[in-house]
Image (cartoon, helix red, strand yellow):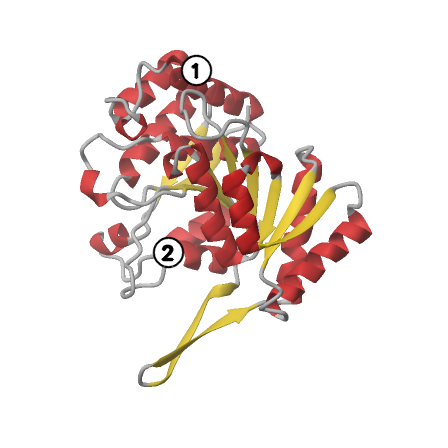
Amino acid sequence: MAKHTIVLVPGDGIGPEVTAAARRVMEAAGLQADWVELPAGASAVAEGYDDVLPQRTLAAIQAHKVALKGPVTTPVGKGFQSVNVQLRKKLNLYAAVRPVRNVPGVKTRFDGVDIVVVRENTEGLYSGIENEVTPGVVTSLKVATAVACDRIARYAFRYATRRHRKKITVFHKANIMKLTDGMFLNAARRVHEDEYPNIEYEEMIIDAGCMKLVQDPTRFDVLLMENLYGDLISDLCAGLVGGLGVVPGSNIGEDSAVFEAVHGSAPDIAGKDAANPLAVLMSGVMMLYHLHEDAVADRVRNAYEGVLTDGQVVTRDLGGTAGTKAFADAVIARL
């Protein structure tokens, strides 16, 4: 087994607790790693850095190619730009991949959900180009480039092929945004027709797609969409299987990858040993597969699924009473 160097960004609020728990479990499962722990978010400012995304943290991820990140605080309607958005743009992490599956022991309205949301991660309305053109009038620019549209379409089809997925559905609003979403749609069509005709392909206007998702999510396999749509739909899909606490997330680029929990920093329960570390742990499993540590990843996944199936040690968000450390202890014992 190789020894890896992994950047660990604990984040804000509950971030340090859940990332520490995930790290402890992965090491107990056999991961050999040197962890480079660096700050981002409000915690970076609290530590005396001038920026919520310190250059030191960014440089470390660029150097070591992989990071595990906890949740960070993003002010609403004011304050600094999202750390997550900055990371994705500065490291060119163009593909956000969020698998959404039913979790053992977590009963929801639907069974058999197994969806992967593939989201373009660098442009669209999240480009952050906003201007007040005159008092009381603000514009926000949606950016689409042929390069980025083609790149994410090709990534989605390549992902589907490698993971033996059968169908890709593109969610769009090209009936209204004919140029931006039209470009995205045309790129997906070209890649499908020219390179991956073996993958089943369909297109769906996003409002109709949302309706069909909540009617029967089992009809979907891989969902491909631009940035804003992907952000919204991935959270909607998480709600189908129990919420953001039971789904992982990853941000993939040509040179680097950042794996992260997609839930918030929950400052109201920070430091109380009350948070569920499962989402970070699941993201850690994605990271292990990315590092080709498949055996370690399988052990961790089998262990947390076993704990959830038993239902004896369950965190509060899933109806139990266990704390962060107790859940991690149970997973380690299960190993």
- At label 1, the amino acid type is Gly
**Residue 91 shows in the view:** no
Q: Position of residue 202 (x, y in %)?
A: 69, 48
- Disc 1 vs disc 2: which is toward the camera? 1
Residue at screen point 29% across, 51% down:
73
Q: Position of residue 146 (x, y in %)?
A: 66, 66
- At label 2, the amino acid type is Val
Secondary-structure class at tag 1: helix
Q: Which of the two discs, 1 and 2, labels the residue nearer the N terminus? A: 2
Which residue lies under the disc numbered 1? 306
Image quarter hosting the N terminus: top right
- Neighbour class for label 1 at 10 Å: few (<14), some, many (≥20)? some
Tell me: residue 205, above or below residue 160.
below
Q: Is residue 118 left or right of residue 335?
A: right
- Which circle marks residue 83 in the picture? 2
Quarter-of-image position of residue 56: bottom left
Q: Position of residue 129 (x, y in %)?
A: 44, 72
Residue at screen point 26% across, 27% down:
316
Tell me: residue 21, above or below residue 308.
below
Image quarter hosting the C terminus: top left
Q: Is residue 142 left or right of residue 107?
A: right
Q: Nearer the viewer, residue 96 or 35?
A: 96
Residue at screen point 30% across, 17% down:
313
Q: Is residue 298 left or right of residue 149?
A: left
